[in-house]
Amino acid sequence: MLMTAIDDIVVVVLIAGIFGIGAYLSKSNDSESFFNANHALPWSLMVGTLMASWYNGAGTMGTVGYVCTMGFAAFFIWSIGSHAVRFPLALWIAPRISVKAKGTIPELLRSHYGKFASVLGSIVLVITCLSIADVAAIGYIGEAGWNANKFVAAAIVVAIAIGLTCLSGLMGVAITDMIFFMLMIVCLCAVYPKMFAEAGGLNGFHAALDTTAPHMMTALGGIPVAQAIVLVVLCINLYKDPAFYQRFAAAKTPQTGKRAMLTCFSIFMSFDLVMMMTGIIIGMKFPAEIAAGTVQPEVEYIRLVLQSLPVGLRGFFIVGLTGAIVSTLDSYYLVGGEIISNDIIYMLRGDKRLPDKTAILITRISAIIFGIIGLATAFRFARVYDAFLFLASISMTLLFVPMIAALMYDGKKTNAAGLASMIVGAVSWIYFYFKPIVVDTVTGPYSIDPVLIGLPLSFVAFLIGNRFGTDLTAARKAEALEKGIPLAELGLDATELTEEYKKSIKVEWIGADGALILLYIVLACFYGYGILHNVDWIVGYAAPIIAMGIVIFVFVKYLTEVFAVAKKSNK
């Protein structure tokens, strides 16, 4: 057992302190504050909560597990690719969310495709909000740190996540996200250079793997082409992620959410490099065991980090890593509960809103149920990332096409198009999941992921369905004009929005937006050069320093904002 009594005390004190801070700073007595934080999240808090929600069990421990077999390709295909294809989400989609989605995806689906499509989408989203991969990741943390039973460890942390969700709502979740994500990144980045040096740097990587697994040392090797395509496709899974929609809707302004996510991309990539190199170190230590399935790479990753940290600091790392997962759990429990109370029950009641206290109570009960279901199913997958890919794949196939059309396409969209797209996507995914198409590759037989088949079929079904049914958007416009309701209030016509709003969603290519995009490009080239040319100081030292530097700046920025508000209120 690597954790000592001192480490245990640090863990308990930190968790109790963070829990108390979240509860104290977030008083939520109504639905608006509980679910959307009164649309008042500042830039710094947006960065923290987006970062913590992103780096869930799959983003931290799951990535390490897959890198053991993918090698450098994980960085060049997964990390760089995943963030690059999400830039449109930050630049153009995020600003529209606060107007068109109003915080939840089912509202968006209902307004464009009707109630049935909204209910179907709600069910899928609630299933993804169970966060099964994150519950599994918690179990591995308990096993690595304390030799604890995976289920017991997961149950304890799930209870903490449920408590944060029930107690404080979105503002409390965002505040604790900020603290957790700072601890996680700073602790791992601080110890990583030591682990990198002990492994012999990049030359040590090549010495260990050039003969046994040379494909892992190339930018595009290590994974079949079909799997690489799936990874890039699933990178756009975030476009239909309900937690991110909620965050963007809760930002102070459309510009706030956009720039927060643009900032996150550079942090994501820097921290990805640190985690992925750590994963390769694990692969070097246990190549045969990992291939045989006798060693769990996620567990060995935690043990490696804990062995490299002094007593006391191990507690900070465990809290940071666990906190990243708690941040994801409480985020999705909150979103899932909101969907049940404010969308599913709302529609079952004939479009009648529940009283605020009732909606919050149902959300809290839902969080408890989510936790129970997650614990019952989390350990049925061989790896953390397998659980993530399973849920991401089916939800992507069913929801992506109708959602993007609703947000970005201002032309005709019928209720038949939305339903056809969702049903065909779901049915085709289920069929090809159980009846996969297998192709031969240089590395052996490979089953094509059903998302690669279901997603195009979903798009074709949308196009065909759009020739039938009712254009609900046009009908709502006609009704609004008849009743004298401004179209902008319904998010139907961007031309009626104020000039101030148009300015806030405009992309400033020569300005802050452009600078943040350029920073990402420069860092991608910088890190890529370091990997391919064996530059140890870039891969082993610059990446963690840059990640820590940005994170500490964001955290200090948030503290100054808190102190400024407190000082102003005391006058």
Image: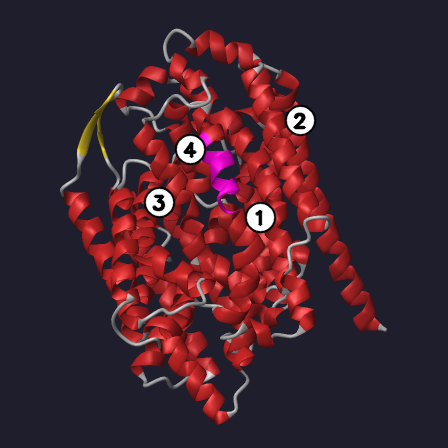
Foreground mark, 1 or 2? 2
Would you name the residue on which mark 1 appears?
180
Q: Secondary structure at mark 1?
A: helix
Task: Compare marks 2 and 3 and give the one earlier in the sequence.
Answer: 3
State whether residue 315 is above or below residue 443.
below
Q: Which mark is residue 542?
A: 2
Q: Which stretch appears magenta?
A: 77-86
Task: Compare marks 4 and 2 and give the one earlier in the sequence.
Answer: 4
Task: Compare marks 1 and 2 and give the one earlier in the sequence.
Answer: 1
Mark 1: few, some, or many residues within 10 Å (few <14, many ≥20)? Answer: many
Mark 3: few, some, or many residues within 10 Å (few <14, many ≥20)? Answer: many
- Report the side of 340 relative to 302 (left or right): left
Q: Measuring from the top left, give residue 466's x and y in whole percent.
A: 29, 66
Q: Measuring from the top left, give residue 520's x and y in whole percent.
A: 62, 38
Residues at marks 4 and 1 touching, judged by CB atoms closer than 8 Å: no
Where does the C terminus fall, quadrant-wise? bottom right
Between the residue at mark 4 and the residue at mark 2, the CA separation in whole angstroms equals 28 Å
Picture quarter containing residue 23?
bottom right
